Amino acid sequence: MNEALIPYEEDEITRLIIDDHDADAFAPIRHLTVGDFRNWLLSDHATSDVLTKVKAGITPKWPLPSAS
C-alpha cells in the first residue's frame, strides 16, 4: 500500500482504498501471495472468527461511492 497504480488525486476508488486500509488487520496475511491467499481462504485456518479479524485489511468500507 505504498504506491498507488492510479494517482490518489485522480481516482475516488484509490482514495477509498488508501484512506480506509487497516494495516493492523492486514498484517496476519500480508506475507501471502495471491495463490497462498487463495489456499489460506480454502483452508481450515480461515475460520469465521479469523476472517472477521482480517476483513478490514482486505476490503475497504462499503458501499462504494456512486459513479458520477
Image: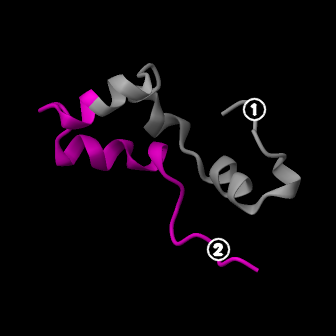
Amino acid type, label 1: Glu
| Residue 4 part of the magenta-drawn span | no
Please name the residue that numbered disc 1 is placed on: 3
Residue 46 in the image: above or below residue 31: below
18 relative to 6 in the view: left or right: left
Amino acid type, label 2: Pro
Label 2 SS: loop
Q: Residue at x 46, y 35 (%)?
A: 26
Magenta span of residues: 39-68
Where residue 38 sits: x, y (%)? 31, 33
Where residue 46 sits: x, y (%)? 21, 37
Q: Quadrant of residue 10?
A: bottom right
Closer to the N terminus: mark 1 or mark 2? 1
1 relative to 8 in the view: left or right: left
Residue 7 in the image: above or below residue 15: above
52 relative to 42 in the view: left or right: right
20 relative to 32 in the view: left or right: right
What is the total number of numbered labels drawn onto the structure image? 2
